[in-house]
Amino acid sequence: MKRKVKDFLNNSKTLRIFMIFSIISLFAATPIFASQPKIVSGGIELVKAATGWLMLLIPVTAVCMFVWHAWMKSLADGEGGQVAERNKKMKNVIIYSAIALGGTGLVNLLLGYLK
């Protein structure tokens, strides 16, 4: 018995064929026969609703923060440190809002494949 198992493991051609069929059955056949539970479809709808709100709130918040920093920069009266700090914060607002919108877009893209 040990010899048969050892020969099977040592015979790479047999092992390769076995692994190929295992991988095909795991990744290809399982999703065909499985149905999506209601909790999963409800969770997907919840995430879609939340990302829809985020797609609205992120740009609005970014514009408000950018305007705030621009206004505070205009009130700085030419102080070099304050102007440089506000410029840096305005740049950070643009960068972070772009990252947040990109992440939200990726989540929407991934959810599109689940449907």
Image: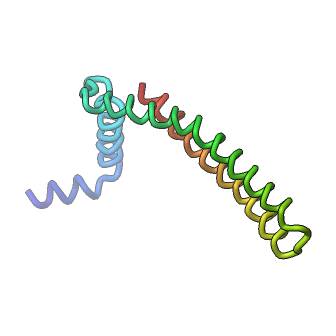
Q: Is residue 13 above or below residue 109?
A: below
Question: Along the horizontal axis of the image, is 34 left or right of 112?
Answer: left
For the N terminus, the quadrant is bottom left
| Residue in front for this viewpoint, 17 or 48 | 48
**Residue 101 visible in the displayed image:** yes
Q: How is the image coloured?
A: rainbow
Question: Along the horizontal axis of the image, is 10 left or right of 102?
Answer: left
Tell me which residue sits at (88%, 73%) in the image.
Answer: 79
Question: Along the horizontal axis of the image, is 9 left or right of 86?
Answer: left
**Residue 105 visible in the displayed image:** no
Q: Is residue 32 above or below residue 101?
A: above
Q: Is residue 12 above or below residue 53?
A: below
- Residue 2 image position (x, y, % from top left): 11, 61
Tally the marks.
0
Tell me which residue sits at (63%, 45%) in the image.
Answer: 61
- Residue 70 image position (x, y, % from top left): 80, 55
Q: Is residue 83 above or below residue 59?
A: below
| Residue in front for this viewpoint, 113 or 8 | 113
| Residue in front for this viewpoint, 104 or 111 | 104
| Residue in front for this viewpoint, 88 or 16 | 88
Q: Residue 89's image quarter?
A: bottom right
Tell me which residue sits at (45%, 36%) in the image.
Answer: 50
Toward the right, the furthest residue is: 78
Tell me which residue sits at (67%, 47%) in the image.
Answer: 62
- Residue 31 image position (x, y, % from top left): 32, 29
For the C terminus, the quadrant is top left
